[in-house]
Amino acid sequence: MLKEGINGFCMALADSVPGVSGGTVAFIMGFYDRFIGSIHDLAFGKMREKKSALMYLAKLGVGWIIGMAMAVVVLSTLFESHIYAVSSLFIGFIAGAIPLIIKEENPKGYLDAMRQKGGKESFWEVGKGILFCLIGIVLVVGITWANGRIGGGSMDLGQFSAGLAVKLFFIGMIAISAMFLPGISGSTLLLIFGAYIPVITAVKGFLSLDFSYLPCLMFFGCGVLAGAMTVVKAIKVCLEKFRPQAICMILGMMIGSFYAIIQGPTTLEIPKAAMNLGNFQILPCVIGVALVAGMQMIKEIPQGDTTMAIRPEKEEIPQGDTTMAIRPKHEERR
């Protein structure tokens, strides 16, 4: 229970900040496959699988809710007053996560092709990987650029309307899909659609018992649930059958999210200048990289200890002792 709660808490902190994905944290901490599998089983599995998935996700959800509530209360103010420090922190986080994902996943379809194939075939496989990476970059950068031209950051979730409700439903449905990917975050998509600050403000207002935000938040929540139940199937299929291509595209989306974070200050309620070398802060960036390294260390320690604890029991005790105990009895009876 405690381990799942901590995992959910860390995911929530990541999901609350533009540029970082809860899926990235799940991948780094080593529970990503179980997380995706549980969501899939809950929606499409048999009754026994649904119960097991529900138990796991409930534990994860408790930590996620606590983490998100804390993030909303703290980060909504911090994000506006220290936007460049927070953005620098998560630029470091993503910069540290990209080589880690390459190391863990090692887009095998393409790297193996380079080793085993030669000539045109090897060039074609590598070219496909680069193509999918570029698609991910263009997707994020293009939407971010378009959002800056459209200027969609003036939503007021305290003023309910049918058009706003429909828009929030689809935004929630699209944004939650990013939570399942170890790449672009749901918060980044909210930022791209100009909904990040409005949603954070609405959740904070609702926690302060301002129920004027409730109707819009309900439609947003319904979109999140609909997205969780439908998108996860496609993601699972892509990661199982087309994993090298999916990972390359995810890496491209992560690279593209740098641009979304750089443009983040321009989407605030009181817009600020986009991030540049003058307001970039090195120390928070280094802390972000260190957080990724720390998560990886936490992921690796239990695996080594568990292996050392199990092997001796299975190898030494049953075979030798059982054989020695049985033979003398048969010999005495004879």
Image (cartoon, rainbow, N blue to C red):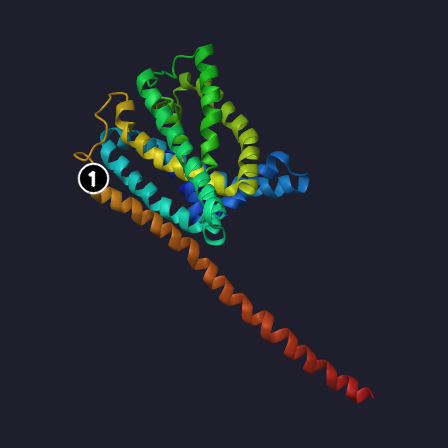
Q: Amino acid at mark 1?
A: Gln
The residue lying toward the viewer, choosing from 234 and 12, is 234
Residue 71 in the image, given as x and y percentages of width and height: 35, 35
Which residue is found at the position 41% from the left and 16% from the top?
212
Compared with residue 127, is residue 156 higher up or lower down, i.e. above or below? above
Q: Quadrant of the C terminus?
A: bottom right
Residue 259 image offset from top left, x and y in percent: 31, 31
226 on left or right of 163: right
Whether residue 15 can be seen here:
no
Q: Residue at x 45, y 17 (%)?
A: 167
Q: Which residue is mark 1?
A: 281
The local secondary structure at tag 1 comes to loop
For residue 165, above or below residue 190? above
Residue ID at (41%, 46%): 101
Instruction: Say left or right for 294 vs 45.
Output: left
Q: Quadrant of residue 192?
A: top left
Q: Residue at x 35, y 31 (%)?
A: 72
Give how far across and how far down residue 287 sits, in percent.
27, 46
In this view of the protein, can residue 284 be seen by the observer? yes
Query: Eyeballing the image, is 272 above or below 297?
Result: above
All told, the count of numbered labels is: 1
